Amino acid sequence: MSVLFSGTNQGRFTSTGAAEIIQIRSDLDWMWVMNQTVSYAAGAGTGAEFYWQRGFTQGRGTIYTKTSVTGALANAQIAAASGFYLIDSSVNVPGASTAITSITGNGGAFTSPLVLTGNTQGLPVTAVVGANNPAGVVRIFSTTGALQIGGMDFTVANVVVNTSFDLIYMRTIVNAAGPGTYRVIPFDPLYYPVNRLITKIVVATAGTVLAGNPALQADEALVTLSVTHGYTVGQVVRFIIPTVTATAFGMTELNGLTGTIIAVGDTDADGSTNTIRVDIDVSGFTAFAFPLTASPRSTFAQIVPVGENTAEALLANTNILGDSTTNTGYIGIKLQSGTGSPAGVTGDVIYWVAGKSFSVDN
């Protein structure tokens, strides 16, 4: 006979000012959180304890706020979208379709496209403008004047609440007037490694230093990808470069070739670091050309992981099984950040206890 786990898990963390995801293999039916920093400090007005139970509305919960005069705890419902979110990352359902006003082709950091929108719900705010500081992934749909990126996933950064966000790893495109839409993609695909879409390929010729990086050798391909890639040195990848028009996507000689990743994180000519360096001599190839304006296409230029170069991985002291298929799914709970939220603010010390009940009757 099988027995359902019934018990508790517990832990602590120090808040970074961002939402905190706690993975709990056993699943959970209730959670209690104490902000030790607030609980022990003089003064009041912010959340000291929080409670969630299965059946509560996603993003809500109960807050116990430390009162200013006596220090007693006053309970209330956590504000919408500021509390607890139960997570099962194997269920990767995109967020609601959200309107885009327009796209400024070079308005973001690194001259990347800046997306204007009146609704950024589901994307965390990022404080450091211009940094490689990802804040989630979105999928763009049917933007007038930028149909060439319709259906693509992009890591975003520099989120300004209900105003804009940057497609941080995308190259400059022609400005695009609305309307259009985007949807938040909450999780990576269930199995790693995954295919990634290409936004730039740069050739380093002899004697050239790209973006202050002397380690980039002559004739190697420096490839920028649209979503944070997660690849490691030693992985072997295949290039798919479709021929759509003379300006989309160019570099046809690279199509179907395989190469070994020999470096990750080089800075490209626009300042972004979501890159891989591949040991293919592309010096004699035609230039890669992501379309600047709306363009018909059959598919996107992309990277497909196909294996591992063990010698290269050993040389770089990386995992020789980096190409292994891994189920990345998890069950857990997301704690939102803020003075009225369970993940607190930067520097707060947070303790938590989560439990799995033998039965739940809601």
Image (spheres, grey):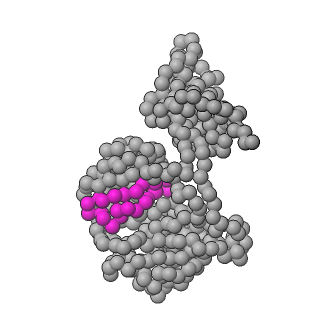
> Which residue appears at 73% of the width and 42% of the height?
2
- Residue 177 coordinates in the image, percent (x, y): 24, 57
Question: Horizontal and vertical percent for residue 128?
Answer: 47, 48
Q: Position of residue 351 (x, y in %)?
A: 65, 32
Residue at 62%, 44% (x, y): give it.
Answer: 23
Residue 28 left/right relative to 175:
right
Q: Quadrant of the N terminus?
A: top right
Q: What are the residue bounds of the magenta stretch?
A: 132-157
Q: How many marks?
A: 0
Give the camera-side residue of 165 and 227: 227
The magenta stretch spans residue 144: yes
Residue closest to the eye, 239 or 43: 239
Horizontally, residue 325 falls left or right of residue 294, namely right
Extreme-front residue of the structure: 1
Task: Tell me where residue 154 sits by quadrant.
Answer: bottom left
Considering only vertical position in the picture, is 58 above or below 216? above
- Where in the figure is residue 325, as x and y percent of width and height? 63, 64
For the question of whether residue 139 can be seen, the reply is yes
Residue pushed farthest right?
1
Q: Residue furthest bottom?
A: 284
Quadrant including the C terminus: top right
Answer whether residue 134 is magenta in the image.
yes
Q: Does residue 338 appear in the picture of this structure? A: no
Query: At 39% from the left edge and 66% from the top edge, which residue is drawn?
Result: 171
Q: Is residue 307 above or below residue 181?
A: below
**Residue displayed at 41% across by 77% down:** 242
